Amino acid sequence: MYIMKILIVEDDKEIGKLLKLYLSKEGYEVIISETASSGLKKYYEENPDLILLDLMLPDFSGLKALKEIKKEKDIPIIIITAKGEEDDRIIGFKEGADDYVTKPFSFKELVLRVKSVLRRYGEREVIKFKDLEIHPKEYKIFKNGEEIKTSTLEFKIFMALYKNLGKALSRDEILDSIYGFYGEPVIDRSIDVHIVNLRKKLNDDSKNPKYIETIRGVGYRMVNDEN
């Protein structure tokens, strides 16, 4: 079963601890960073599903981190601001922030905001990735405007890798990701066959991959341009 991952970038240790407590109770995996630079590092390493980003951080502004992340990938981000930072909130929205909370805030309300933002993203009809357009509801992938014909299982393997962008997944981990909605056993090594088919359809060179990379001794990963 896929567990959603939330990255908290917050230099106040007590707030970070309480956020982790509340979000963990809701079944999320939670990672905490206390600086913008370490937050960016964790973002590229962990590929979270949502980021809670404080704007006032000790090394550099959360707005700078927000801009860099949104330029690389359209991931949901909720900014955390202090009272009187209206200008920063406005800039944050212009840079792509999805919501904001003002300190001091209700932790229960923040959890509801997290769920709401994730739900909105889950309902989006189109995901743009590199030169691809992905339509999750329709199980379709388009490349440069032309549909790439994939089987249902190929599409789900692609999405399992995309949801873990930049992270190497073993064959078992890929199977675990798709079991929940596929419902039938899939032979471990058959993943290799489906990957070969996906690469052919995407015109992806296995020696110089743009999308799916083979990690020897591990499995596969979706190529993140920061890798």
Image (tube, grey):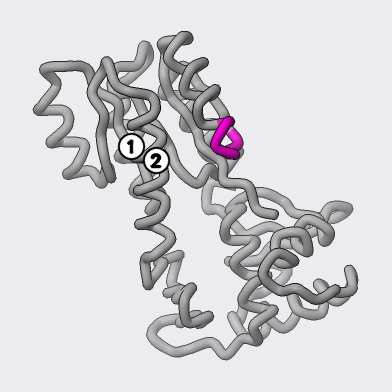
Q: Residue at x 64, y 62 (%)?
A: 160
Tag count: 2
**183 is higher (above) or lower (below) than 111:** below
Q: Residues within 10 Å of mark 2 (few under 14, many from 20)?
A: many
Q: Residues within 10 Å of mark 1 (few under 14, many from 20)?
A: many
**213 is higher (above) or lower (below) than 164:** below
Looking at the rendering, the stretch of residues picked out in magenta corresponds to 24-29
Residue 171 vs residue 74: left or right?
Answer: right
**For residue 105, what is the image quadrant?**
top left
Q: Residue at x 17, y 32 (%)?
A: 89
In the rendered image, which quarter contains the N terminus?
bottom right
Report x, y in % for residue 2.
Answer: 65, 53
Q: Which residue is mark 1?
A: 78
**For residue 107, what is the image quadrant?**
top left
Q: Are marks 2 and 1 in contact (CB under 8 Å)?
A: yes
- Residue 114's disc number: 2
Residue 88 vs residue 130: left or right?
Answer: left
Report x, y in % for residue 66.
Answer: 33, 37
Question: Upstream in the sequence, badge 2 or badge 1?
Answer: 1
Residue 26 part of the magenta-drawn span: yes
Question: Type of residue at label 2?
Answer: Val
Q: Secondary structure at mark 2?
A: helix
Question: Type of residue at label 1?
Answer: Ile
Q: Residue at x 66, y 66 (%)?
A: 212
**Looking at this view, is 107 or 166 the one in front?**
107
Q: Residues under labels 2 and 1: Cα distance? A: 8 Å
Residue 88 part of the magenta-drawn span: no
